[in-house]
């Protein structure tokens, strides 16, 4: 039995799931034009959770028109940056005031431990909104000295890119939604947000807060619905100026093609196969703990999960045994159970996919060091799994599994070039983690790794730190100055004096 007694605001979250959820277009909650609704399920039980409106191409047309109208309205386009910032700070405050309800809702919808939602996802979402609110008043162009004949006054303006479609995945719904909407609002864009069909609830609840804050009509619109209908229509729409997407590399490729029609600006955060490298001089206890956290957090459903562990041979046995001990001790269960450390994966499909990877690895000769067993309980659970004796050609080593499955490898030398080559042997390049106390090795390796973010001896996400991928992990960066500048167009103005 799940002990939910101690979960604050669970009653509020449950009441919210039972409400009628419409689409939010042009400042109004409206019914979808064609298809009625679809239901979502609780991944911890496999049972129906909520009934949500299903947007189709006609709703996309309406939402894009509403966003365009906001971009053309003086209320939004001429709003002072400090007023935009104030609205955003107010949104962050409201989210913080309702943090327990959001955490419970996120756990119901996505399955993640409510503690993780309450103490990681939500504080991160709130901080992301505040961080970007601060940028609203600091987005400036520059003056430029020209060298051609004549006397010139030349400068750049940073203008909002316009109507932005934002498509987010199910693994960290509220944190992803915040990472998308905050820089776009700060830059003065008009948004159409489409949450994942599996997890629309916190985006819906957030929309109520956005309504309460009082952003101008059309500045923010929410469409719940499916990727191949609402999502595809958004990415192909001729009046959308930019699309930002987080999700699979496969869908990223479709989006890129769809965006080509009108040369939409595109930011893509895609898959990863992050290497975690444990050097000979690492603090082994910390490396073990960090390596386990990196792959098992959020049941491994993290684009930046440390799924390939490279350990110097002098520590290999100790590290693999240490991570395995942690894996075996992890308490698996419903995210709403206060003791749960690892929740279910998002769906039956995802569970079966993960199991498929593990068994294909084993069939090809990998050794199952820990996990891999099927858990006999309702809902979609997978045990934390460690594979050794893999080779670089196996699908488990090459492909993003998006589950709690770790491939552990040893390396025999501490020659940096070779370590970097092994770590870089992936079509992805999102993140990399190094455990070492050798300052030179850390910095030299950081230069050699083909990854958008390199972390040394731990570290987490920060809204100030650019995030994004090399290679097939994506296009562009979110967070930091680059993240907000990606929502602007640079206009150069040259005045002959
Ligand atoms: P995952 O494989 O992790 O489920 P996806 O990349 O399929 O993630 O989905 C992430 C988001 O992309 C979801 O909001 C989904 O609805 C959306 N999506 C899926 N297919 C398409 C598509 N063809 N065009 C636009 N969005 C899509």
Image: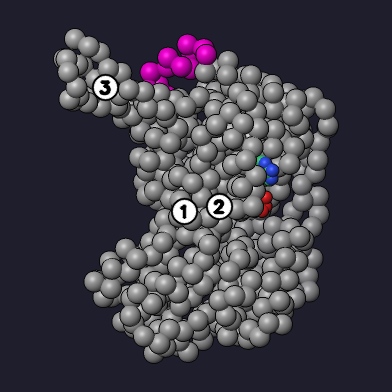
Q: CA distance from mark 1 to mark 2?
A: 7 Å
In which quadrant of the rendered image does the C terminus lie? top left
Is residue 477 shown left or right of residue 144? right
Q: Secondary structure at mark 2?
A: loop
Query: Is 80 included in the stretch rendered in magenta?
Result: yes
**Which of 238/178 is in front?**
238
- State the colouring used for the structure image: one colour
Q: Secondary structure at mark 1?
A: loop
Q: Quadrant of residue 302?
A: bottom right
**Residue at point 40%, 84% (across, down):** 312
Vertical arrangement, residue 155 with respect to residue 291, above or below: above
Q: CA distance from mark 2 to mark 3?
A: 35 Å
Q: Which residue is disc 1 drawn over? A: 469
Q: Position of residue 29 (x, y in %)?
A: 69, 24
First in sequence: mark 1 vs mark 3: 3
Q: Position of residue 134 (x, y in %)?
A: 35, 34
Vertical arrangement, residue 492 with respect to residue 42, above or below: above
Q: Secondary structure at mark 3?
A: strand
Magenta stretch, main secondary structure, is helix
**Residue at point 38%, 65% (across, down):** 449
Question: Mark 1: few, some, or many residues within 10 Å (few <14, many ≥20)?
Answer: many
**For residue 270, which numbered disc appears in the image?**
2
Q: Residue furthest right?
A: 35
Q: What span is colored magenta in the figure?
A: 72-86
**For residue 155, which numbered disc appears in the image?**
3
First in sequence: mark 2 vs mark 3: 3
Is residue 101 shown left or right of residue 411? right
Q: Nearer the viewer, mark 2 or mark 3?
A: 3
**For residue 27, which numbered disc appears in the image?**
none
């Amino acid at each position: 039995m799940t002990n939910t007694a101690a979960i604050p605001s669970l009653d509020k979250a449950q009441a919210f799931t039972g409400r009628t959820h419409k689409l939010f277009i042009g400042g109004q909650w409206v019914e979808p034009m064609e298809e009625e609704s679809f239901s979502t399920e609780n991944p911890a039980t496999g049972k129906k959770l909520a009934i949500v409106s299903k947007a189709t191409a006609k709703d996309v047309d309406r939402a894009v028109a509403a966003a365009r109208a906001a971009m053309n309205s003086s209320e939004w386009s001429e709003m002072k940056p400090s007023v935009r910032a104030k609205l955003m700070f107010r949104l962050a405050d409201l989210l913080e005031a309702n943090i327990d309800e959001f955490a419970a809702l996120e756990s119901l919808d996505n399955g993640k431990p409510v503690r993780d939602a309450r103490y990681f996802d939500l504080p991160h979402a709130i901080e992301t909104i505040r961080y970007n609110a601060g940028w609203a008043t600091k987005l400036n162009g520059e003056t430029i000295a020209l060298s051609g004949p004549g006397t010139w006054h030349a400068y750049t303006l940073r203008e909002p890119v316009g109507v932005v479609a934002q498509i987010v995945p199910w693994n960290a719904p509220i944190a992803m939604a915040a990472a998308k909407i905050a820089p776009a609002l700060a830059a003065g864009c008009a948004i159409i947000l489409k949450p994942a069909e599996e997890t629309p609830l916190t985006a819906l609840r957030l929309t109520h807060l956005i309504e309460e804050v009082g952003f101008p009509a059309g500045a923010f619109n929410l469409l719940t619905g499916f990727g191949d209908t609402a999502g595809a229509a958004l990415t192909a729409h001729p009046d959308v100026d930019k699309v930002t997407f987080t999700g699979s590399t496969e869908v990223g490729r479709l989006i890129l093609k769809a965006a080509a029609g009108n040369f939409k600006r595109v930011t893509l955060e895609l898959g990863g196969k992050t290497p975690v490298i444990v050097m000979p001089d690492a603090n082994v206890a910390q490396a073990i703990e960090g390596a386990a956290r990196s792959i098992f957090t959020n049941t491994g459903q993290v684009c930046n999960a440390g799924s390939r562990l490279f350990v110097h041979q002098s520590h290999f046995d100790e590290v693999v045994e240490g991570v395995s001990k942690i894996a075996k001790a992890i308490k698996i269960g419903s995210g709403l159970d206060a003791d749960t450390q690892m929740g279910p994966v998002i769906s039956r499909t995802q569970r079966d996919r993960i199991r498929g990877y593990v068994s294909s690895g084993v069939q090809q000769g990998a050794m199952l060091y820990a996990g891999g067993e099927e858990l006999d309980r309702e809902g979609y659970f997978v045990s934390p799994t460690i594979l050794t004796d893999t080779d670089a050609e196996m699908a488990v080593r090459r492909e993003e599994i998006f589950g709690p499955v770790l491939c552990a490898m040893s390396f025999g030398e501490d020659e940096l070039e070779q370590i970097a080559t092994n770590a870089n042997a992936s079509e992805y390049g999102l993140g990399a983690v190094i455990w070492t106390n050798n300052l030179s090795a850390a910095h030299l390796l950081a230069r050699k790794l083909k990854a958008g973010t390199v972390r040394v001896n731990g570290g987490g996400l920060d809204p100030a730190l650019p995030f994004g991928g090399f290679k097939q992990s994506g296009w562009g960066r979110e967070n930091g100055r680059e993240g907000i500048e990606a929502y602007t167009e640079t206009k150069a103005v040259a005045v002959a004096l």
